[in-house]
Amino acid sequence: MGFAEHVLVALFPLTLFAMVFYDAECHGHQGLETKLFCLMALSGAFAVAVKIFTWVFDGRIFPLSDSMLWVTTILYMIALVVVSQIWVLYVVARVKGALRAAELKGWLIGEGVLSAVYAVFVFLTPWTHSIFTITEANAYQRGPLFLVPYVFVIVALAIGVGVAGYGWVRETRKERRRDCVYLIAFAVVPFVGLVVQAFWPAWWLGWPSMALAVLFAYVNVQNTQIATDALTGLNNRSSFDRYLQARQSRSDQKDCWGLIMIDVDRFKDINDLFGHRTGDEVLRSVADVMREQFGSRDAFLARYGGDEFAIIVSCSGESELDDMVCRLRGEHVCLAEEGGQCRFSLSAGGVLGTDAHLGEEALVARADAAMYCCKQQRSDEGARRSSDSSSEKGGVGAL
Amino acid sequence: MSLPSEILIDLFPALALIVLLANARAGLPYSRANRVFVFAIGLAVAALCFDMVYGLLEGETSRVAWWAQWAVSLGYFSTVGPVAFCWFLFVHGSISGDGALLPRGWKGIAATVPVLVYCAIVVAVFWTDAVFSIGSDIRYVREGLFLLNFVFGFGYVVAVSVLSLVKRRSTVDGDVRRRCKVFIFVPVPVGCSVIAGWLFGDLALMIQGIAVSLIFVYFDLQRERVSRDGLTGLNNRRRFDRYLAEKCSSGNGGRPWVLAVIDIDGFKAINDTYGHVGGDQVLKRMAKGLKHVFGRKNAFIARYGGDEFVVVLDGGGLREAEVCMEAVGDLLSSAEDQADRIPVAFSVGYATSDSNGAGSPDELMAKADRMMYSVKRDR
């Protein structure tokens, strides 16, 4: 292949890496995952750019061209492996839900050591001629161990798949499991690409397929962000509306499901007394409670509004739904604030989705009414209790 | 070019576009403009495939190959041109207020004529060989009108950039302005790839450039959805947190700015009395009021939580923010807005960036929050 041809094929992956990097860096959510992702896209772009440089010197003889070819090729060999190592870190961070780099310490050290050994091996190539060598005509030629970088990258991809698979087995929450499946899927394309390129070098599939996987992963991350509420990580209102509509239109006699609305009792007071940050904390705890109770069921959890949450859950019938609602009513969220502990109870109300052919709004209104019924009872009880001057420990009444 | 390169150069842009196509089908919000955009992606994929098949057929000598080559070239031309037209429709639909794909009246007709002429010329190739012909060596040969068709396609793209530039100057809607900015730069990748193809020896690289542009625009569509609150169309909490963090850390170049936290009074009661539909309506009206008043200013508006909104007024003082919020209040209590008879009142708290740095986002929010609640309690 000539220089122009090489460059033309490499230009698209380079552009794609750069675009993904720019978009994620300037507009992405801030956090460890995004940082790792940006780093991956950036090092991908760097690797392709270096690769293009190697072609400038490859097969041409001019002053210093041979040493430049050595330097750029070695740099490229290292960049290649760095990208795959960052991929592993990214997968681990996503599966573990890590927020700080310190949580990945073990992985960082392990990968660092592995990369260092590899780097030394690559740096010695000008003397050992193991991975590649440069001919008299200043042309790159595969050495006897040319497969080593490929193996490194493929093993890294395999480790990523293994970690994601482990997450899939361990994880009980539906959306996290789906995440893991996607992480496995992302690795497939580069895997195929690299195997093809290792055996048929004319098919330069490695980097284009890598760029494609990064695009795939990025779009997927965006999709998740679009569908979820940033604060609680549950589905947001618009995905709830869409899901409810879909569920209603496809529901038949066999499919029995219920809609539960949840509301934090006297949430306004929390915001009033402790400010928004504390209120946010409470909302997050409510989301955790919901995940704990419904995570392993076939349930769709969403934040409906400010302090309102909604659950669409498959159930066997009215009695099971009532059970679930009762259990939610028994739940409360604890909040440690200035020495004392406050407990906030949850009001919940449920309605069977197959009850009648109601519209979506009417269904939500019914569940809401059931929830308000519960809330009303609660506040009546609370009023009675406080008039009895009963000493409830840190209850809502204590506010 | 060797066979692998011929294929790779088209295969991966096509695959990238297919990823976007699948994603768009699953989730892009429905609008006529977005549908046209998805259609344009489909056309670009088709054009890339034609280009790929063309590369495969090169070097064959049979009569069948000649016809196949002719058909493929025709297919290429009949997909590339319409991509440019779809681009025009999409942009017009995205930035015109009513979402119409074509301008009204004679402008609409003038905008359609070039694509009709283009199609007529392409269809007529069968008899005239005006745009291209296939030589006896199964190679594509450019003919006289090739450049004309090229000009038609690029004409639309340039027209779109001009349109966006004009719209960006005339509109006050921040979203449209931001979108226009993206649209203005879309011809850059296409132009670059054309020039690169020309430099690297007579290569047709335009379609790859188009793919890059489409991906660029798709990212922008996704980005907008990530940072947008579905109900009110304002920025969402995620976007606001990032914005505030950047604002606080950058110091805003020494210019003062004000953070206002707005909370609707008695929103729970509204929800109880009028149901969620009524509550949603109130939120939308509030958002509309904020957009109307702050749209003309250098302000960032977001929905913070259930019934809470935040505004960051850049370069303005506390007094200006207060005047604006009064204007919002007047707007919401004005006669025409009271038509649906849900009265809306709100409380506002402010926090200003002081001269010695702004403080942390948390501190600012807490400060504005405290003020807002004390105002609310006094009511």
Image (spheres, coloured by chain):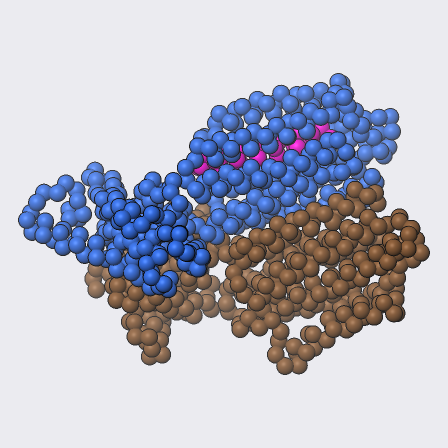
Foreground: B127 or B151? Answer: B127
Residue A162, quarter of the rendered image = top right
Residue B275, quarter of the rendered image = bottom left
User: Is residue A332 found left or right of A388 in the rendered image?
Assistant: right
| Residue A98 in view | no
Residue lying at the far bottom of the rendered structure: B105
Give the image location of residue A391, x and y in percent: 9, 42
In this rendering, is residue B308 above or below A24?
below
Prevailing secondary structure of the magenta residues: helix
Residue A99, quarter of the rendered image = top left
Residue that appears at 73% across and 57% down: B47
Residue that appears at 43% across and 35% down: A171
Tint applied to chain B in the drawing: brown
Residue that appears at 84% across and 45% down: B1
Residue lying at the far left of the rendered structure: A388
The magenta stretch spans residue A302 = no
In this rendering, is residue A100 above or below B85?
above
| Residue A366 in view | yes
In this rendering, is residue A189 above or below B57?
above
Image quadrant containing the N terminus of chain A: top right
Q: Magenta stretch?
A: A73-99
Give the image location of residue B210, x and y in percent: 70, 56
Give the image location of residue B196, x and y in percent: 78, 52
Give the image location of residue A307, x and y in percent: 31, 53
Foreground: A327 or B193? Answer: A327
Residue lying at the far top of the rendered structure: A128
Residue that appears at 26% across and 63% down: B272
User: Is residue B368 found left or right of A67 in the rendered image?
Assistant: left
User: Is residue B202 found left or right of A357 in the rendered image?
Assistant: right
Tint applied to chain A in the drawing: blue
Residue lying at the far right of the rendered structure: B136
